[in-house]
Amino acid sequence: MVGTMAKEKGRKLIAQNKKARHDYLILDTYEAGLVLTGTEVKSLRQGRASLVDGFVQMDGHEAWLHNVHVPEYSQGTWTNHSARRKRKLLLHRAEIEKLDAKSQETGHTIVPLALYFKDGRAKVEIALAKGKKEYDKRQTLREKQDRREADRAVAAARRRQRA
């Protein structure tokens, strides 16, 4: 066997955008491939990236990922990439047209939720989202706390039952 490298299997999470789920109501999610340079892939393999200010913009029949921070590769030379450059997303034409039409609606945007490797290929999970108002955020937080308290009460009741 000549130079057979073991293929990666499964999903390896690199970065997650937890703030997006707090700030936006997620309507629909898509998985997209990314067009990356070699040093970007190497930097991602080290598990370094930030999706915090990221967003997707449609330009003609192409989707572009903006403001995602992939730090420069430490061993890179002049071939290194710029950390916040825009990156092309790989989606099917029908998905791009659907996202483009939906994102034109008032209050809708497309945000990255997660960046990961799937079977050795870099992927980004993007979501069609609608911005939440401040009171919606408080409502979501309250529901989450209520659910947590209810779970605690059920667990405590079970513990008392066993004892």
Image (cartoon, rainbow, N blue to C red):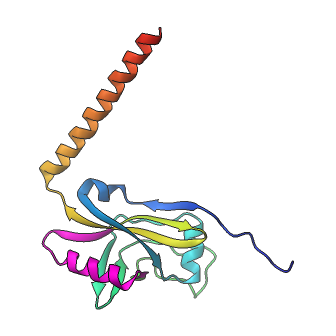
Magenta stretch encompasses residue 16: no
Tell me: residue 26, above or below residue 106: above
Say which quadrant the N terminus sits in.
bottom right
Is residue 89 visible in the rendered image? The answer is: yes
Give the camera-side residue of 26 and 111.
Answer: 26
Give the camera-side residue of 105 and 21.
Answer: 105
Tell me: residue 82, above or below residue 61: above
Instruction: Pick out the residue farthest to the top.
Output: 163
Identify the image quadrant of residue 5.
Answer: bottom right
Residue 150 is left or right of residue 138, and the answer is right
- The residues colored magenta run 89-111
Q: Name which residue lies at 48% across and 71% down.
A: 123
Q: Position of residue 10 (x, y in %)?
A: 59, 61
Q: Position of residue 128 (x, y in %)?
A: 28, 68
Residue 55 is left or right of residue 44, and the answer is left
Q: Position of residue 121 (x, y in %)?
A: 56, 73
Tell me: residue 74, above or below residue 23: below
Q: Name which residue lies at 63% across and 64% down.
A: 9
Is residue 73 visible in the rendered image? The answer is: no
Instruction: Pick out the residue farthest to the front.
Output: 94
Give the camera-side residue of 67 and 35.
Answer: 35
Q: Name which residue lies at 30% across and 59% down.
A: 20
